[in-house]
Amino acid sequence: MTSLDPALLPASGRFEGSEHCFPLRVYYEDTDAAGIVYYANYLKFAERARTEALRLSGRDHQELLRDAGLFFAVRHVEVEYLWPARLDDAVLVRTRFTSMGAAFVDAEQRLFVGDRLLARVLMKVVTLTPTGRPARIPAAWREHFKTYLMDPAGDGTATASQT
C-alpha cells in the first residue's frame, strides 16, 4: 500500500488555542433556487467541522466505536440564523467545546463569512452504546477532551464539568 501525498488529503482546519477553525466553500448543491444556503445545510457544515476538530485533536469516531463500543449522537441542537450564506462564499466554522459531563459534550459553533456572523449552533452530543443506551465517556477520552474545553464566557480558560 502506498501512502497518500499529504497535499491530497482533505483539510482538517486548525486550532487557535482550544477553538477549532474549519474553512469551507459554499457549493451550488448547498443552495436553494435563490443561491442562498438551504437552512439544514448549516447543520451539515457544523457536523463536518466537529468531526474534523475531533480528528485534528488526535481522536476519531471509528476509534471510539472500535475501542469502547460507543458512538456520538446529537441529543439537542439549537440554530440561530442571522445572515444568509450564498453560493461561492468562503465560510469559516469556529467550534468551541464548552462543557463536558459523564456522557455528553456541549459545543458552540459559529459560522462566519469574513467578520459577519451567519449562524450560531449550540449542540449537545452524547455517547451511546450500539443498542442506543447512554454510556459514560471513557476516562481516556474525558482526559483528552479537557485540553479542548473552553468556558462559556469564551476567555480560553480550560474547564471540565465532573457531572
Image (tube, rainbow, N blue to C red):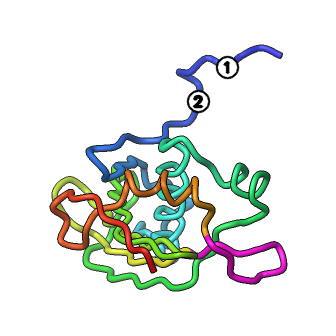
Q: Quadrant of the C terminus?
A: bottom left
Q: Looking at the image, is 80 positioned above or below residue 41?
A: below
- Residue 21 located left or right of residue 72: left
Residue 141 seen? yes
Determine the secondary structure under disc 1. Answer: loop
Left or right: residue 60 versus residue 31 is right
Q: Which residue is mark 1?
A: 4
Q: Quarter of the image for the N terminus: give it.
A: top right
Q: Nearer the viewer, residue 124 or 11?
A: 124
Tell me the chief SS of the magenta region.
loop
Residue name at image x 38 percent, y 47 percent: 23
- Quadrant of residue 161 within the rendered picture: bottom left
Residue shown at the point (18%, 71%) measured from the top left: 153
- The magenta-colored residue range is 126-136
Residues 75 and 151: in front is 151
In magenta segment, residue 103: no
Check disc 2 and report the residue beneath it. 9
